[in-house]
Image (cartoon, grey):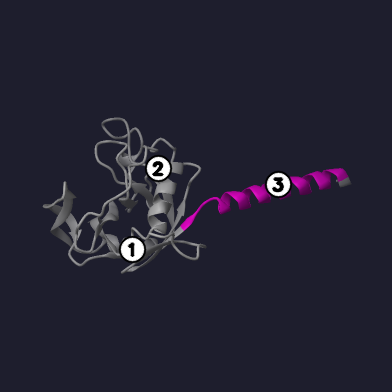
Amino acid sequence: MTRTILWTLSILSMIFMMTVASTAKDKPKVLLVTSLGEIQLELYPDKAPFGVQNFLTYVRNGFYDNTIFHRVMEGFMIQGGGFDQTYTKKETMEPVPYEGANGLKNYRGTIAYARTDDINSATSQFFINHSDNYGLNHGQQPDGNGYAVFGKVTKGMNVVDAIAKVKTGVSNLRMNINGRLYENPANNVPVNQIVLISATVIGEDKKADK
């Protein structure tokens, strides 16, 4: 093998390594500390730029700290990011546009946005898929859409499994509508609260000012 070929291969190898390093660096990582253990997430801004930026803003502002997982269904998903420990829905930022057609699938361990029937209604609430939920993928819902995945669990699926197995029942979730609090009974609420104690961006020293 000539020196020129070796030099070319060396350059190509360096370019490849730089690309891999850059790609890894561009994937923010978030640590969720729950009352049952820690979950580490990897986010994909190249696939879901609006969703990732939205999630990171909530994380940096401390929005998710001391919220609860308010909907838990073993074999389906665990949902949180919307209610505090008094079961009251928190005020959120404006919704983000739908990014469900980004090619990411609702496979076990992925994190996606919860929403209403309006595909552009996702705000702070998220869910982690406990199994491969093909019916939640883009094109599988009656309207042809789905639920937008924006990251996945890289560590702590055992914690997700533990949360998914907790006993659930019916509890009243409280929502502020035009200055008045309304209580609505909801199924699949953990009998003993599962608290998201804190959410932080790994590698950042502190959250932004609230």
Which comes before the other along the chain, label 3 or label 1? 3
Number of disc labels: 3
Which comes before the other along the chain, label 2 or label 1? 1
- The residue under label 3 is which amino acid type? Ile
Residue 105: mark: 2
Q: Nearer the viewer, residue 89 or 98?
A: 89
In the shown orientation, is residue 89 left or right of residue 124? left
Which comes before the other along the chain, label 3 or label 2? 3
**Which residue is rendered at x = 31% and y = 30% of the image?**
144
Query: Which of labels 3 and 2 is toward the front?
Result: 3
- The residue under label 2 is which amino acid type? Lys
Majority secondary structure of the magenta segment?
Answer: helix
Discs 3, 2 touching: Cβ within 8 Å: no
**Does 126 appear above or below 162?**
above
Residue 15: mark: 3
Disc 3 secondary structure class: helix
- The magenta-colored residue range is 4-29
**Residue bearing mark 1:** 65
**Which residue is rendered at x = 70% and y = 46% of the image?**
15
Q: For the C terminus, give its image quadrant.
A: bottom left
